[in-house]
Image: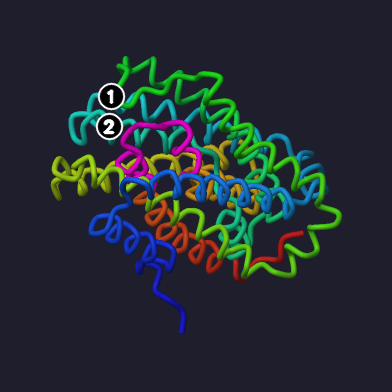
């Protein structure tokens, strides 16, 4: 029996349990550097495995469909940030500067990979194009996300100590050594490691999720120790949920209209809508740990966690609707 789309997925349930554990039993004192070292190693392993399983052939073949990818990348790295900035007069008063920065962080992140491809396939869309767009978006995001956060932080006039992102050699060193180099190493060893990774998908999935849970536990432990939850009433959580819903609805609607106006096929429209509207939790949480080092990471990733669950529920429903509408059509080629 399939899980209803409105129910949280297993990862979200684990995230909620991790947040609860960090609230009741946060890591403190001598345990903090131990957890930090373990988390850094787990993040490096995560990106190494992503490098091993990402097909270079699929990327190069998919890049030929440049018009589709241009729309997806524009939505991911341009439309989302523009909406986040334009809506600032309404968003920031609702949730405060720290959570608003977390919303901007959502806007700067790359697309998901696995779920974008899965929903595109379920909806009978262009799976090859979705695979290329989502994968390339994650690669570009390693460089574009920090740059976008620095630009947007300066644009909104964020002050040091209030969640501002200042690019420095330390930031780039963290991205280079923890994210990029392990990914490149995975690509270099793909010929030998790729088949093993493909044969152990369940183990890789557990590794991915465990890494996210480690980072979230560390981030929310720090937030608990610092007493940040005292300033997070239920009304603020409801406001964050509303903001995430508005962002997702705006982007999915605009992408649907734009895809049809530009004459894309139904299959391409599906890939554009799912790849261009989704944001990665798997890469986002580890990246937040580097970009917002020493800040309230627990609060900053909270909007992303909410957006993640919301996009899964909404996209599952829309994918099934696409599939029903195309049930009588010829299979995509």
Secondary structure state at the residue bearing disc 1: loop
Please say if 244 is above or below 159: below
Residue in view at x 27 percent, y 58 percent: 25
Secondary structure state at the residue bearing disc 2: helix
Q: Judge left or right: residue 106 versus residue 73.
A: left
Q: Given this view, does label 2 or label 1 mark the residue nearer the observer?
A: 1
Residue 117 on image: x %, y %: 62, 56
Q: Judge left or right: residue 15 versus residue 126.
A: left
Residue in view at x 53 percent, y 24 percent: 170
Q: What residue did someone put label 1 on?
A: 162
Specify the segment rendered in magenta: 285-304
Numbered circle sitting on residue 98: 2
Q: Nearer the viewer, residue 272 or 178?
A: 178
Q: Nearer the viewer, residue 141 or 294?
A: 294
Q: Nearer the viewer, residue 128 or 59?
A: 59
Residue contact at pointers 2 and 1, CB within 8 angstroms: yes
Q: Which quarter of the figure has residue 133?
A: top right
In whole angstroms, how far apart are the C-alphas of marks 2 and 1? 7 Å
Which colour assignment does the render follow?
Answer: rainbow
Give the mark nearer the N terminus: 2 vs 1. Answer: 2
- Looking at the rendering, in which quadrant would you find the C terminus? bottom right
Whether residue 117 is in magenta: the answer is no
Residue in view at x 37 percent, y 30 percent: 84
Q: Judge left or right: residue 207 versus residue 330.
A: left
Looking at the image, the residue that sits furthest to the front is: 30
User: Chief secondary structure of the magenta span?
Assistant: helix
Please say if 184 is above or below 218: above
Residue in view at x 66 percent, y 45 percent: 135
């Amino acid at each position: 029996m399939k899980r209803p789309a409105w129910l949280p997925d297993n990862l979200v349930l684990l995230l909620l349990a991790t947040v609860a554990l960090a609230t009741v039993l946060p890591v403190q004192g001598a345990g903090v550097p131990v957890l930090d070292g373990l988390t850094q190693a787990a993040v490096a392993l995560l990106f190494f495995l992503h490098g091993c399983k990402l097909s270079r052939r699929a990327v190069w073949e998919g890049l030929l469909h440049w018009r589709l990818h241009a729309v997806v990348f524009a939505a991911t790295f341009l439309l989302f940030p523009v909406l986040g900035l334009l809506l600032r007069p309404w968003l920031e008063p609702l949730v405060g500067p720290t959570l608003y920065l977390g919303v901007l962080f959502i806007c700067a992140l790359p697309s998901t990979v696995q779920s974008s491809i899965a929903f595109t396939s379920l909806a009978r869309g262009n799976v090859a194009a979705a695979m290329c767009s989502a994968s390339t978006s994650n690669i570009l995001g390693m460089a574009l996300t920090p740059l976008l956060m620095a630009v947007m932080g300066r644009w909104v006039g964020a002050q040091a100590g209030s969640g501002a992102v200042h690019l420095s050699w330390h930031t780039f060193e963290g991205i280079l050594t923890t994210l990029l180099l392990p990914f490149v190493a995975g690509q270099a060893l793909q010929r030998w490691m790729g088949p093993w990774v493909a044969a152990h998908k369940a183990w890789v999935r557990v590794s991915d999720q465990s890494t996210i849970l480690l980072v979230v536990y560390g981030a929310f432990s720090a937030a608990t120790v610092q007493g940040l939850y005292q300033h997070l009433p239920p009304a603020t959580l409801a406001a964050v949920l509303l903001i995430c819903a508005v962002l997702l609805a705006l982007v999915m609607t605009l992408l649907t209209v734009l895809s049809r106006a530009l004459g894309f096929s139904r299959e391409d429209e599906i890939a554009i809508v799912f790849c261009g509207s989704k944001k990665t939790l798997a890469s986002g949480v580890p990246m937040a740990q580097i970009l917002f080092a020493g800040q309230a990471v627990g609060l900053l990733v909270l909007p992303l966690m909410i957006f993640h669950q919301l996009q899964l529920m909404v996209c599952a429903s829309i994918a099934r609707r696409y599939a029903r509408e195309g049930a009588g059509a010829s299979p995509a080629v």
